[in-house]
Amino acid sequence: MDADYAQNYRSLYCRHWWWRARERLILSTIEEIRRNRRDGGILDIGCGDGLLFEQLSRFGEVEGIETDASLVCENSPWRSKICIAPFDRTFRPGKQYSLILMLDVLEHLSDAKSSLVRALELLDSDGTLIITVPAFPCLWTAHDDLNRHFKRYTKKSLALLAHQAGLQMSSCKYFFHWTFPIKLLLHFKENLFGSGIEIPKVPSRWINETLFHISVVEQKLFGNTPIPFGSSLLAVGGKQ
């Protein structure tokens, strides 16, 4: 990750409307999954500084793995629970997990299939894997370049990857529907006029809160409606 971006990541995660809205969706999804099961460990792949750990700890014992050391603070209260290492077969925690998260991880990987296979190897036979990825190649912007993405996914391309890796998806849906036309316009604008890469920042308070509440309303209104577009994609599944 870009050094300046990494330095500001904690502030963005805690304050920016996009990260806050995504976290809300993830936690509501986990609440549904873990309603009748609170046992078993949780692994957050690509966990950064463990910014989601406090919330995840409500659902079980949590630990994580992060490949980018610049995202992990040595004085983090969760430092002992975070392994800084590549996520591949050299990562051997000596256990399996009932819940594994790969939140906006797969798009950063040149070999997403191998990482997904490894995640499934670490999943209990009746465990759950939650994935989020950016959606639709037509929404590619300078933000994807900044984040060093390899790919944006559709339901079809994610389903193909899941099948190849041995993941049985129980649900797959787009979210951030309202941002789709905005990002599409930005994509065309950048193609026509070019664009410099800008580090994301938290908008002014009233804009930030307005966009957060728009996203929350969207989740409440369309959370169970299969709308065929959105700028992000959420999948839930387990072993085949």
Image (spheres, rainbow, N blue to C red):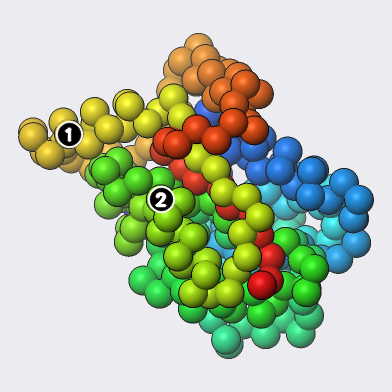
Percent position of residue 221, x then y: 62, 21
Q: Quadrant of the N terminus?
A: bottom left
Mark 1: few, some, or many residues within 10 Å (few <14, many ≥20)? Answer: some
Question: Relative to residue 184, is residue 167 depicted above or below?
Answer: below
Percent position of residue 68, x then y: 48, 66
Percent position of residue 194, x then y: 11, 38
Indicate which disc, 1 or 2, sits on the residue closer to the N terminus. Answer: 2
Q: Which mark is residue 188?
A: 1
Q: Residue at x 68, y 48 (%)?
A: 52
SS label for mark 2: loop
Q: How many marks?
A: 2
Q: Which residue is mark 2?
A: 154
**Is residue 68 left or right of 1 when viewed as pictured?**
right
Q: Residue at x 62, y 50 (%)?
A: 171
Residue 82 can be seen in this image: no
Question: Relative to residue 28, is residue 137 depicted above or below?
Answer: below
Kindly identify the amino acid type of the residue bearing the numbered disc 2.
Answer: Thr
**Is residue 121 left or right of 48 when viewed as pictured?**
right
Percent position of residue 231, x then y: 41, 38
**In the picture, residue 220 is in which quadrant?**
top right
Q: Residue at x 42, y 55 (%)?
A: 156
Mark 2: few, some, or many residues within 10 Å (few <14, many ≥20)? Answer: many
**Is residue 44 left or right of 46 when viewed as pictured?**
right
Q: Quadrant of the C terminus?
A: bottom right
Residue at the bottom extreme, as displayed = 90
Residue 114 can be seen in this image: yes
Question: Relative to residue 69, is residue 55 depicted above or below?
Answer: above
Residue at the top extreme, as displayed = 206
What is the C-alpha distance between the residues marked 1 and 2? 19 Å
Q: Residue at x 45, y 36 (%)?
A: 228
**In the picture, residue 81 is in which quadrant?**
bottom right
Which marked residue is nearer to the observer: mark 1 or mark 2?
2
